[in-house]
Image (tube, rainbow, N blue to C red):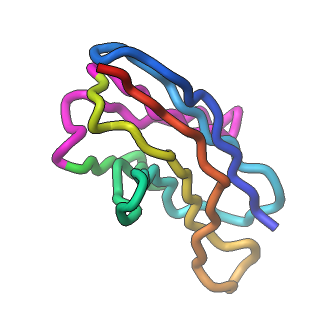
Amino acid sequence: QVRPVESGGGLVQAGGSLRLSCAASGSIFSIAAVGWFRQAPGKQRDFVARIRSDGSTDYADSVKGRFTISRDNAKNTVYLQMNGLKPGDTAVYYCAVTGRVRVGSALLDYWGQGTQVTVSS
C-alpha cells in the first residue's frame, strides 16, 4: 500500500511562505506523477500543481509565479514551495501519487490525508 504523507502546513500571514512536503511510504514500482490539490471548506478539490516522472511540471493559473513544485528523488519526497500566500489559498492541501505498485498493474492515484494551510489577512 502506497501512503503519501503530507507535512508543512500551518498558519501564515498574507504575503508569507510555506513549504509543503509529500513523502511516499510503502512499496511502489514506478511513479508517473505527483500532484498537489487543495480543498477549501464547502468547495470541490482543485488541482494546484503536478510534477511528472520526466520532471515536467504543471500549475493552476491561480498559483503560477507563486508556487513551485520540486522533488528530491533520494528522499522520495516532493515539495510545494508556496510564496506570496493569499487568504484565498486557505485550504487543506492533499498530495496524490500516481503510479503502479508492480509491473503491469493499473496506474492508480494514492492520496494522503492532507495538511491544513491557513492564510490570515
The C terminus appears in which quarter of the rendering? top left
Q: Which of 106 and 68 is in front in this view?
A: 68
Which quadrant does the N terminus fall into? bottom right
Question: Which residue is at the front of the view, 111 or 98?
Answer: 111
x and y percentages locating residue 101 in the rendered image: 74, 72
Horizontal and vertical percent position of residue 52: 43, 54
Against 67, is 109 above or below? below
Snapshot quadrant of residue 16: top left
* Quadrant of res 41: bottom left
Residue at 39% of width from left, 61% of height from top?
42
Q: Is 33 on the left-hand or right-hand side of 97?
A: left
Q: In this view, does 23 lie above or below 11?
A: below
Q: Is residue 66 magenta?
A: yes
Q: Which residue is drawn at 16% across and 47% down?
A: 61
Q: Where is residue 54 in the image (x, y as percent from the top left)?
A: 43, 52
Query: Magenta residues?
Result: 61-84
Q: How many labels does the image show?
A: 0
In this rendering, the answer to whether 24 lies above or below 29 is above
Residue toward you, 37 or 55? 37
* Position of residue 29 measured from the top left corner of the image (x, y, whole percent): 73, 66
Q: Which residue is drawn at 29% across and 50% down?
A: 58
Does residue 93 belong to the magenta stretch?
no
**Which residue is at 62% across, 62% downward?**
111
Q: Is residue 42 left or right of residue 61?
A: right
